Image (cartoon, grey):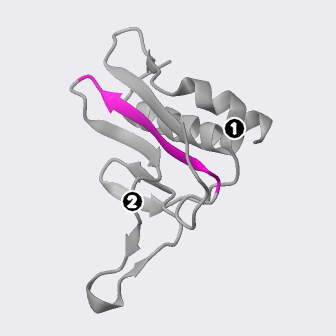
């Protein structure tokens, strides 16, 4: 297990309020699992940003496959890694735990900036 993965695992269950008004918070769920085609890195994770009403604004997770297209030509990705941003879902290329955290915080900062939130 990599050093960055070992650093990510203790964040499981953590919730952080990330602005003074308390209207935005992040939640981390990270578990070690057996490596599989769906989770080749051996992690089940969900990193999410929520607004004050609890609505998810950003999420990086590997809870389910990502489907691109629709109808009989729709395709699913082998790995479950993907990101949610507002109402869109896109595949996410998992490289390592450090990149996952950096990419998550970059999306969080972008969404908060769009909403006029200053950290």
Question: Foreground: 5 or 98?
Answer: 5
Q: Residue at x 64, y 38 (%)?
A: 102
Which secondary structure lies at badge 1? helix
Q: Residue at x 61, y 51 (%)?
A: 42
Question: Foreground: 70 or 38?
Answer: 38
Q: Residues within 10 Å of mark 1 (few under 14, many from 20)?
A: some
Question: Foreground: 25 or 28?
Answer: 28
Q: Where the N terminus falls, by quadrant?
A: top right
Name the outermost residue toward the bottom: 72
How far across and down, in percent of the image, does residue 25 sit?
Answer: 39, 22
**Membership of 42 in magenta stretch:** yes
The image shows a total of numbered marks equal to 2
Q: Residue at x 61, y 57 (%)?
A: 35
How far across and down, in percent of the image, does residue 31 sit?
Answer: 53, 38
Q: Is residue 113 above or below residue 37?
A: above
**Residue bearing mark 2:** 64
Q: Earlier in the sequence, mark 1 or mark 2?
A: 1
**Membership of 2 in magenta stretch:** no
> In the rendering, which numbered label is found on residue 55?
none
In the image, 66: left or right of 56? right
Instruction: Tell me the distance, in whole angstroms, between the alpha carbons under discs 1 and 2.
Output: 21 Å
Q: Which residues are magenta?
A: 41-52
Residue 39 lies in quadrant: bottom right
Which secondary structure lies at badge 2? loop
Q: Residue at x 41, y 65 (%)?
A: 65
How far across and down, in percent of the image, does residue 38 sit?
Answer: 52, 64
Name the outermost residue toward the top: 20
Residue 16 lies in quadrant: top left
Name the outermost residue toward the right: 3
In the image, 83: left or right of 21? right
> In the rendering, which numbered label is found on residue 5?
1
Q: Is residue 106 above or below residue 33?
A: above
């Amino acid at each position: 297990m990599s050093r960055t993965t070992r650093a990510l695992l203790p964040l499981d269950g953590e919730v952080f309020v990330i602005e003074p008004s308390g209207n935005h918070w992040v939640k981390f769920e990270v578990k070690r699992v057996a490596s599989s085609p769906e989770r080749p890195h051996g992690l089940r994770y969900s990193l999410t940003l929520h607004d004050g009403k609890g609505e998810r604004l950003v999420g990086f997770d590997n809870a389910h496959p990502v489907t691109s297209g629709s109808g009989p030509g729709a395709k699913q990705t082998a790995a479950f890694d993907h990101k949610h941003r507002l109402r869109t879902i896109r595949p996410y290329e998992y490289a390592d735990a450090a990149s996952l955290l950096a990419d998550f915080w970059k999306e969080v900062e972008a969404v908060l900036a769009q909403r006029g939130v200053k950290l």
